[in-house]
Amino acid sequence: MMTNRKVRILLIEDEEYDVRRIRNTIRPFANRIIIEDVVASGQRALELLKRKTRNYDVVIMDFQIAGGLSGEKLIRAMKEIDPTIQIMVVTKMTINISDFDFANRLIEAGAMWYCTKYPGDIVDYIYQPTDFILTIFNAYEKKQLEKERLRSSRKLKENVQHILEKKKIVGESEAIRTLQHQIARAAETDSTVLIQGKSGTGKELVAANIHYQSARRFEHFVAINCGSLPSELIESELFGFEKGAFTGAHAEKPGLLEVAHRGTAFLDEVGELPFSAQVKLLRFLQEGEIDKIGRTEKLRVNVRVIAATNKNLWDAVQQRRFREDLFYRLNVFTIVVPELKERREDIPLLTDHFLEKFARQMRLERPEVTPAARQLLQQYDWPGNVRELQNVVQRLLFGGKSQIEREDVQIALGKTYRPPTPLGNGAFDWDPAHILPWREMEKRVRKSYFQFVRKHSDSDADAARKLGLAPPNFHRMLKELGLK
């Protein structure tokens, strides 16, 4: 819909009588169309567009300007400066109006419309005045749509870049450089990827990086933890069902693979899928069709599948717990995520990254870490990998100290203040008598964390929001921890 703003025109014409004809044609619409500038050469038009002192909506140009830049080259040059500018071409009748090759060349160059004009000073208006005026208004609307499209595209790119920044893989070790190279290679293809690695190594992070570096980056990334889905609900969750398919199916439910249409589905712990779901997943990977419960016709979707497992799938195949044909379908492009102890040189970088991240979230000053504390962090074997390190760093911030000592790290790891006995191989011997039970340590840490969040919140509702909990669950956990 047209706004009250006038359509601003740049006119490129070197014949005075043609300038007059265009002005006469536009004059009845002077309240809605204004010719901002008239130039006699393509070079001068480009200078005005580059300056950006005028906000032109539409360019009306003679195809055959005498001397200098003209025709299709001029159209392309203007579109490079401003991709949203709309270009209307006026040409002499010596070019046949039915010349489709000429029209196609204009469109490919970037013009949106063209018309012919009488040769010489014969009439005082454009040959097709009604089409001419309507096209000016259409060109204005098209420019607004193009601007909005570019704005949306720019915002999408910024969002993707922001996500990649949040999900960046921290590390400079050889193992991480190899991993990033594999991610880049996987992102270039649309093949199925199988990510292998111990729990806590960051398999979902790898999958997200593959998605957001791929051509599907602007579509959904749907993460599905196959191990957390109840076995009786896995098929309906993955593939969905139709209304009335079974008792209780009061409405249609799209499956998670359907939700991921045109994007990426990440199947974490894929080895936990029961055999019935494995059969359906195999068919989906082969045919690109979803066998939806209660639907007679198959539903075609376009989804890139990335699977992950912390188990040896081939062993599961040998033990007949996982289908061999599905294993081969998933194992097209394999990525193995290294354990944290295999890249100890990245531990200081990860520690600083998590300290910065959580200190910012908790609105605290980032504490300094003493060399002795760093040494202990780097020597520890981290059986829980990066996830465990992240958890330990969060605990280190609970005390609100400005400096983290070696003893603080020992406590965060679940140990006492008693210094460990060096074993001589970079590890330490902890006395089992001084190790706190894990559940007790977990309860203490959770209690401290809840106390800290409540102290720095305006209300319990605000604290629940920060923790990502529903208020009833938040109050229930306060009671369990003895805080309410």
Image (cartoon, rainbow, N blue to C red):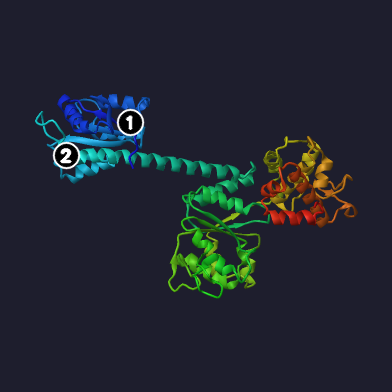
Which mark, residue 56? 1
Which mark, residue 151? none
In this image, 439 relative to 29: left or right?
right
Give the farthest residue toward the left: 122
Which mark, residue 128? 2
Label 2: few (<14), some or many (≥20) within 10 Å?
A: few
Relative to 391, does residue 285 appear above or below in the rendering? below
Q: Earlier in the sequence, mark 1 or mark 2?
A: 1
Three-letter residue code for mark 1: Tyr
Three-letter residue code for mark 2: Gln
In this image, 189 relative to 353: left or right?
left
| Mark 1, secondary structure of its residue | loop
Confirm whether residue 422 shows in the render.
yes
Which of these two is toward me, 457 or 177?
457
Confirm whether residue 425 shows in the render.
no
Q: Quadrant of the N terminus?
A: top left
Label 1: few (<14), some or many (≥20) within 10 Å?
A: many
| Mark 2, secondary structure of its residue | loop
Which of these two is toward me, 188 or 52?
52
Rounded to the nearest whole Å, what is the CA distance between mark 1 and mark 2? 23 Å
Q: Position of residue 115 (x, y in %)?
A: 18, 39
Q: Position of residue 188 (x, y in %)?
A: 48, 50
Asked where in the image residue 273 lies, by quadrant, the reply is: bottom right
Q: How many marks?
A: 2
Which of these two is toward me, 328 or 94?
94
Q: Position of residue 165 (x, y in %)?
A: 58, 42
Q: Which residue is pictured at 27% across the width and 29% down the height?
A: 34
